[in-house]
Image (tube, rainbow, N blue to C red):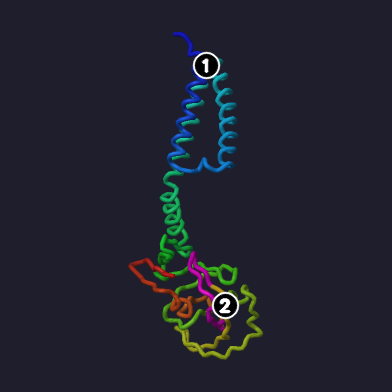
Amino acid sequence: MRPIPFWLWILLAAIALTGVIVYLADLYPGVLRNQDSRVRLGALMAWFGLLAGSVLMHARARPKSALRHAAIWVAIGLVLIVGYSYRDLLTDIGERVRGEIAPAEGIAAADGSVGIRAGADGHFRVAAEVDGVRIVFLVDTGASHVALAPADALALGFDPERLDYTDITSTANGTGRSAPVRLGSIAIGPIQVHDVRAGVNEAEMDESLLGMSFLGRLSGYAVEGDRLTLRP
């Protein structure tokens, strides 16, 4: 069997490249109207030409090895194309897996809401960014305002020793006192609420509480089974 002429390899490569360009131009209409895009395309074609020439020279010397390597690169290219085509679906799957592994991180939806899965104890906990500091809250619709544990208050720059504990609070552990403070913002995923009323608990707490001074300023929240949905 006569070997395929070198010029025919070049012709096949040129046809393949032209097909790719036509496909991309149809997929992204108008993209080649930009001068910078045309320059980048020219550079890409030159790079592809050098790569194709190198591959073809290698194919003439060791055709079986070249075909094997070409098949590998084609497979890699197909995986990348499929991954890019389904990037939104893969991102959604990744978010859901992360939400199952770390329920406090929540899952952001396209409408801006955030879904939270209940922990093993049946309670909802959510990781929030409070004035740039990450704090994990226990969601408590029975709390009138955000209640900060002394350790979290200290992380936010409040000195529990210098605060005025003037508010009387009632909890499952009895009556206590808290010091009123204001938080610049609380962000949970895409949801952000500014100027939030809060209180620093005088007694030690295992975790801070996300109460109604935050939840009441959302458009809504709902519990369905083991899922809590916060709506901006």
Residue at the (50%, 31%) spot, across then down: 73
Against 24, residue 68 (above or below) is above
Residue at the (47%, 39%) spot, across then down: 80
Where is residue 128 shown, x and y percent of the image?
52, 68
Where is residue 129 shown, x and y percent of the image?
55, 68
Q: Is label 1 in a helix, a strand or a loop?
A: helix
Q: Which residues are magenta?
A: 186-201
The front one of 223 and 89 is 89
Residue at the (56%, 80%) spot, across then down: 204
Against 80, residue 158 (above or below) is below
- Is residue 96 on the magenta stretch? no
Against 64, residue 138 (above or below) is below
Q: Quadrant of the N terminus?
A: top left
The front one of 19 and 83 is 19
Which residue in the protein does label 1 denote? 7
- Amino acid, disc 2: Leu
- Amino acid, disc 1: Trp
**Name of the residue lying farthest toward the left:** 225
Lower position in the chain sequence, tag 2 or tag 1? 1
The numbered mark at residue 183 is: 2
